[in-house]
Amino acid sequence: MLSIFNRVFFGIYLRYQAWTANLNLAYYKYRWAKEITFGDSFKFGKYSTIQILSGLVNVVFGTNVFFREYCSIICSDKAELNIGDNVFFNNYCSINCLGKILIGKNTIFGEGVRLYDHNHGYEIPDILYKDQPMKIGQIIIGDNCWIGSNTIILPNVVIGDNVIIGAGNIIFKSIPANTLVISKRETIQKELL
């Protein structure tokens, strides 16, 4: 009897999760109808969020864009975010757009990828870092790229088409098309005394 109860409860739970994800998406489509364009087959996983910090943004999601669970998108005043068709974001990805982020079609992102098109200023000695003006740049990612898990992409980077970036990289320089990026880390083993 418990087994039947568990199956029924789990089925209801899955329907509830799908319903809440669809409700969140419906809210975003209504609330930000002028600022955000959603392509067909847009999917937004549970606990994922979109924050528009002001109404003067241009956000475009292409057809068949899929964000899994716990993803975060933040756009600020005059930001431009354009995500091409058939783009996939795995769990825990984060897009922080104060300037411009363009992502080409057929690109996939592993878990925990972070995109930052800005950085805090630090040049003014009499002002706290948190109060200094942001340095806003842009990120451009080409078509058919694979960005590995836990990669961080920093401002003013252009990533060409057909690029593969291995897990755990910090990308702060542009990468030409048809390139494989890996971080050569050595595992050092020493005998304990």
Image (tube, grey):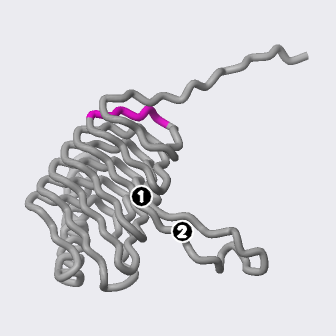
Q: Which residue is drawn at 51% across and 38% down?
A: 168
Please state which amino acid type lies under the numbered disc 2. Answer: Lys
Report, in whole angstroms, how far the alpha carbon at label 2 lies from the one at label 1. Answer: 19 Å
Q: Say which residue label 2 marks.
A: 135
Q: What element carries label 2?
A: strand
Q: Residue at x 73, y 80 (%)?
A: 127
Q: Which residue is drawn at 39% across and 27% down?
A: 180
- Local packing at callout 2 (Cα closer than 10 Å; few below 14, some 14-19, many 20+) is some
Determine whether, in the image, residue 151 is placed left or right of residue 126: left
Residue 178, horizontal then vertical, whole percent: 30, 29
The stretch in magenta equals 162-167
| Magenta stretch, overall SS | loop
Q: Is mark 1 on a helix, strand or loop?
A: strand
Closer to us: 175 or 116: 175
Please state which amino acid type lies under the numbered disc 1. Answer: Ser
Residue 177, horizontal then vertical, whole percent: 31, 34
Q: Say which residue label 1 marks.
A: 94
Determine whether, in the image, residue 181 is placed left or right of residue 19: right
Closer to us: 117 or 150: 117
Q: Quadrant of the C terminus?
A: top right
Q: Earlier in the sequence, mark 2 or mark 1?
A: 1
In reply to whether residue 20 is colored magenta, the answer given is no
Looking at the rendered structure, which numbered label has been put on residue 158? none
Q: In which quarter of the image is residue 159?
A: top left
* Residue 164 vertical placement versus 87 (above, below): above
Extreme residue toward the left, this view: 40
Residue 187, horizontal then vertical, whole percent: 66, 21
